[in-house]
Amino acid sequence: MATKFTTDDVTHIASLANIPVTDGEKKSLADGFTKTIGVVEELNKLDVSVVTAVHMTGLSNVLREDEVDKKRMFTQEQALANAPNTHNGYFVVDQLIEQDD
Amino acid sequence: MKKLNTLTLASAVKKLKSKEISHKELYADVSEAIAGKNKELNAYLALNTEAVSQAEKLLDTPLAGVPVAVKDNFLTVGLETTASSNVLRGFNPPYESTVTSRLKKAGGVVVGKTNMDAWAHGSSTETSDFGPTKNPNNLAHVPGGSSGGSAAAVAANMCITALGSETAGSIRIPSAWCGTVGLKPTYGRVPRTGVVAMGSSLDSPGPMTKTVEDAAILLSVIAGKDPYDATTGELPVPDYASNLKKGVKGLKIGICYMDHPQLKGTQTEKSVEEAGKLFEKNGATVEKVALSDQLEDNTILNPDYAVGVYTVVQRSEVSSNLARYDGIRYGHNRSTFGAEAKRRIMLGTFTLSKGYADKYYVLAEKVRNLYIKNFAQLFSKYDLLISTATPGPALKFGESEGNPLFGELTDLLNEPSSLSGLTGISVPCYWDKKTGLPLGLSIMANHWQEETVLRAAYLYEQETDFNPWTKEAHE
Amino acid sequence: MNRKRTSIRGRRRRMSEWEPVVGMEIHVELKTKSKMFCGCKNDPFHAPKPNIYTCPVCLGMPGGLPVPNKKAVEWTIMLGLALGCEIPLHSKFDRKNYFYPDLAKGYQISQYDEPFCVNGRVHLPSGDVRIHRVHLEEDTGKLLHKTVNGKKVSLIDFNRCGVPLMEIVTEADIHSAEQAREFLKKLYQIIRYLDVSDADMEKGTMRLEPNISVRPVGDTHLPAYKVEVKNINSFAFVKKAIEYETERHITFLEKGEKPPQETRGWNEDKGVSFPQRSKENAEDYRYFPDPDIPPIVWEQGYIDGLKKQLPKLPDDKFQEFVTMGFPTSYASLSSVSPSSVVFVETAYNLTVKKDPTINPKTFGDWLFNRPIDIETANPNKIAEELIQSRKVVSIPDEEIQKAISDVLAANPKAVADFKAGKEQVKMFLFGNVLKTLKGKGDKKKVMEILQKSLTV
């Protein structure tokens, strides 16, 4: 049975995804998702019982030595250069939740 | 005298080195082309105002200071990088992508940043937050995407050569629709470091050029292991340009997807079959590979299923890759995402979510492995597979609007090979006299077999008249 | 009826009917030179300024890609081996997706269903604790909650973001606050022996999170709820938190209610836990394998090699001291930390060289009844002092008896404690007598007379 998305589903997904959506957008998003997932559900026609997942590259154990790589590190100025809001070398964000301190 | 902006990479380097032309002359013609056409085509988003002076210092380098157009998802220090999204409007990268840093080291000059579908989400360049790019061959049509700006810049001679990136078709589709050459390297051949990530298990930066030879030159510059990208392969990088003339004698070539309902009886089918005959005439063994709905030896798995696989894999990865854009450290907050990005992030969030990941993400990865197995079997039999990058010529603007899967339907023929990490190229194989629009021949090979792909593409280009730049070189 | 809940007798009675069921999650920052997935300096605690140890990877810049730190991976495997874990031959890193301002990428690279180490066991006198898993992940940045220009804001420092972080998860095998403390002490010792972390709870390089529930004694099922307590920065507070939570849960259970499943914080000043507002959507992390990192595949031989590289662990050293002839209490004190081991071994060997008649017991009697910090003391000096003290200056018994009487008179509480059965008080009094005698007199004799005086 094909999955059908409701506007409530969209609200939940939007909150998980941290994406603001308006009530007006929800219906068309829900319909779009229903259609897209319908195509995805075609995959159930295939026999995948013997398939195991492999990493794309066929590589394994690509590790780096424990060394400080100074040439890659940013100065504080570089790190903060694109930030809209900074204070004394820190990034600044509005407090998400009331803190108990 | 012919305008210098129409030069290929190979000939521009030669002429600069022999002092037949100067950097000033070359950049004057390129700038003139940009000034004359960019307003209409919208291929470039940002231009490097110091390109000539940078170029003049680079005569003794391999690329001698040629102007290169670079897709706007490569981070470039000193040039705003946005991935065509309002989220990154005003972003000045504090570091350089590995690919552009290799390009610069080899003597390429980034002349400007090219338009793309925002975050590379699309196959038409229509989802750019900075307006669509138009197809230089016919302004009523899209250039393809997501690397549409780079393809248009090459096609309109607004640069000497260009860089793009492909997740599933984003190099090959715009190359096919603009009548240029686009090579999608093996996944892991070219580093993704400093490229705005779309589908991390798929993204492959690559050359978008006027000729096959140019693609070979540029690939040698940008390919190879990068210590900052754990998915790049250790294999040494050959001088791809020196092996172009080996021909196709003795190669086994399979023609695929031509019995797909979308292609039967089309000009595309005709062009691909003619290409097969040309390869046969030049000593290759060519046969058709039948389409199949299940995994079966010596058949090619129906690409229709790839739509579902690609949709899930790519959106899942997108939902995670775009989570870093919160507007705190750089860029703007998450309300500034465009409609397509929001849709993809949300769908990918769903396909990874509790209770659904097994049903969608895990299943998609399994089917993806069916494609990988299918190609492994086929490449035990064939050296190359040929097909087309697109079912037909460039769409008109707005033709795909409102279809939540529009990207995927255009990408259909590239998805299986991209999902399997294969290499492939698109070269012009037809021009419609009435519309002025081209078609692209797609040549695919197994992992790391870029040399074979380039050999066959080079022969095809030399033996046909479809490439306007080689045609001129012949004259 | 108004029963006093806090009366000792009441609590004792209730504690005999109920038992806590506790599992621990412990996070430990590794002291590698560089961070987990990039070459940034790993030293957030000593950084002179915020946001100076960052790069494209740990700052979550577009296009930054992770490459795992080999040393961090090996150290995690070594801790797993030291905890008796199995090391699966196939492992991988996954993305754990959630939003928080201190999480630069919008996901934390962690390990979901294929951790580096599984199924270990730590032996304790109070009962074994099984290790469910040990995995490796990256730390987040640090938030500072401040008011700037009249606005409540959080300041973010990413110096810590991307520091290698091990997570050790036990089974719910802990059934008393004391057992929890014993387990943590042992784990702490092992980490110090391996020398992979400072494991400093004050600095937060070791963080403790007990998951607590309570069930009737005799019940063997896991309770259908658990309460996670965060922000605990000492072993003593873990003990207190478990005691506090156990009491709290019992009040629900006695009313026939199930205590609510929640995450709580620990207020060490008040000695109470308090409910913490949970991060929104924290339940659905949308784990998937990180496509940027190829899997980790081991050959058994490599794991065996790491096993051989393991240093001697607290249990091994304890056994060695016992074999040498140290009484178990001294063996245990000697093997507390790598530096205590080195100190005791060195001091003992030096002492024996100078005076072969000294045995581990007499050495221990002398050493462990003195106020010496064996982590920092100089073994040479100690050995010398011990030898000197053994040069007995003989004095009359009367003088000894007088010193003893003075000490006993000055410490009536100690005497009373001794008479109430606290044997160990004797060593305290003995020490004081020796002090009064300034090292003179035969110690055996002193002890004899003291014993007599006390039992009169």
Image: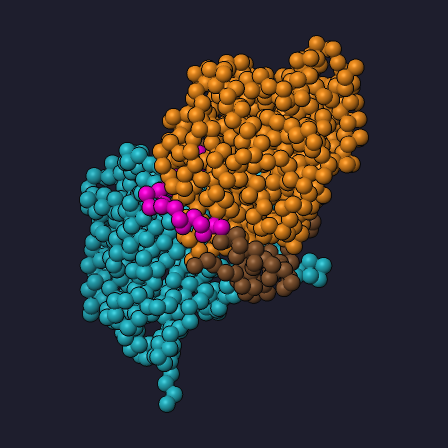
Chain colours: A brown, B orange, C cyan
Magenta stretch containing residue A42, yes or no? yes
Residue under the point 44% across and 50% down: A42
Q: Would you say B407 lies left or right of C334 here?
A: right
Q: Would you say C203 lies left or right of B180 here?
A: left
Q: Is residue C123 above or below residue B419?
A: below
Q: Is residue C343 above or below residue A96?
A: above
Judged by its main secondary structure, the magenta piece is loop
| Residue B230 position within the rendered picture, expressed as x and y whole percent measured from the top left | 48, 34
Residue under the point 73% across and 22% down: B5
Q: Which residues are magenta?
A: A39-61
| Residue B210 position within the rendered picture, expressed as x and y whole percent measured from the top left | 64, 23
Q: Is residue A97 above or below residue C99?
A: below
Magenta stretch containing residue B328, yes or no? no
* C270 or A48, nearer to the observer: A48
Residue under the point 57% across and 55% down: A32
Q: Does residue C331 appear anywhere in the picture?
A: yes
* C450 or B100, nearer to the observer: B100
Q: Would you say C100 lies left or right of B125 here?
A: left
